[in-house]
Image (spheres, rainbow, N blue to C red):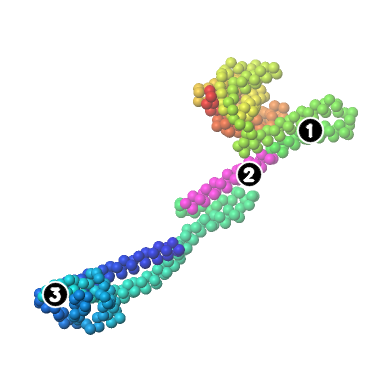
Amino acid sequence: MLAVGLFLGVGSVAFVGLFSAALRSGVEQSASAEAESASAQLVAADVTTLPEDDGRLLVLVEDGRVVDRTDDEIELPTPIPDGDVFVSVVDDEPVVFASEDVDVDGRDLVVLAGRSLEETDDAVGLVSMLLLIAVPVLVALVGGLTWLLVGRALAPVERIRREVSELGAGELHRRIEVPVTGDEIGRLAGTMNGMLERLEDAQTAQRRFVSDASHELRSPLAVIRQYAEVAALHPDRVDPAELSSTVLEEGARMQGLVESLLLLAKLDEGATGTARRTVDVDDLLLAEAVRLRSAGGLRVESAAVAAARVDGDDVLLARVVRNLVDNAVRHARSVVRLGCSTDGRVVRISVEEDGPGVPVESRAHVFERFVRLDEGRSRDAGGSGLGLAIVADVVRLHGGSIELVDSALGGAAFIVTLPASSAS
């Protein structure tokens, strides 16, 4: 309303000024034409007196003195203003006079013809009054219509805001009603529903994660407590060496699980804690090959490991290789094969084994947290179900990808693709 009022106010003032100027210009032109006509009549008649005509306001001036006039009420200012056009007052009415020089009988005379400005002033006053009434009415009308139309347009937004504000943490399953208008409001409601769906999925995943973590931590705690209670009640039935070994084993399992949970929490926040540097992936693979050979029990093939470098966190990338190798060891029958190659743009890391493989329908779930397939459910062989989830998160954090395919050895093959280092 302020903007429209200001615009209309300035426009009205400008219009009244232009309107007044146009009317006055017309009156001045009419007065000039009247002065020319009267001058022509004097020259034609060769007289120095004005014709008697009550309908015209004429004044004859010589050397600044009035020598004749058609109306005795005409009073001119003294001295008479110079210029072709000036305004004076006749019978308390403003009159515009136009002058025309004329030479009659050797005398230099000036003919002044006047036109009243009363009608012009009345017209300007009427227009001004109409605008003075119309502008506030129009501003109020525009304000009311704007309030009504914008209010109706934003009513769905207010409804969406109210519905969202009423949602509690346990009501993320609710959805916003989407208007059928197909406009921006409908798209906003759809976007809000998409956000609520993502929040619900995140909340469900968080609850499932907490539940699974609690379950995984409860098992070693239960074992430690069971052995401790038996040792306390029946000291003669528990071998101290067995008790110590069990506590150390379960404590190590708990420590590994807690470390994995903390690492996943950091990865969820997108923080690694260290600066990126150039990492020799082939060194990581060869170090794991040496570790496996020293442990014995499996044949380790590393002939396919070629020099390759990536930019990233060396600790996290070493964790990726270690988790993939440990997973392969748990499922391999006799052979684990490590490989690495690069084409200058990407680096491909492969870890294969000759185990039972992974069914196609289960491959999409092996990278989820706390997911262990049926054949890996035992605590000794199955791990905590976080190793491959860590691998997937670290690879994603480094801008790469991971896929699970069939291995030429008959088991599963994990293929990690990472951007090659610019220093390669």
Residue ID at (68%, 40%): 210
Q: Position of residue 316 (x, y in %)?
A: 63, 29
Up the image or down, 375 lies above or below 69; here it is above
Q: Is residue 59 visible?
A: no
The image position of residue 347, as x and y in percent, is 54, 24
Residue 16's disc number: none
Q: Quadrant of the N terminus?
A: bottom left
**Three-letter residue code for mark 3:** Arg
Distance between mark 2 and mark 1 Cα atoms: 31 Å
Amino acid carrying mark 1 in the image: Val
Secondary structure at badge 3 equals strand
Q: Pointer 3: what residue?
A: 107
Q: Which residue is mark 1?
A: 223
Q: Residue at x 33, y 67 (%)?
A: 17
Q: Earlier in the sequence, mark 2 or mark 1?
A: 2
Residue carrying label 2: 203
C-alpha separation, residue under disc 2 versus residue under disc 3:
108 Å
Query: Where residue 232 sits in the image (x, y, percent)?
Result: 87, 33
Q: Left or right of 180: which side holds 121?
A: left
Quarter location, residue 243: top right
Which numbered disc, 2 or 3, marks the residue that appears first in the sequence? 3
Please tell me which residue lies in front, 307 or 198.
307
Give above or below for 205 relative to 376.
Answer: below
Dot 1 crowding, Cα within 10 Å, few <14, some 14–19, many 20+: some
Amino acid type indicated by mark 2: Gln
Q: Quadrant of residue 317?
A: top right
The stretch of residues the image draws in magenta is 184-211
**Overall secondary structure of the magenta stretch?**
helix
Q: Which is in the foreground here, disc 1 or disc 3? A: 3
**Tag 2: Cα neighbours inside 10 Å, few (<14), some, or many (≥20)?**
some
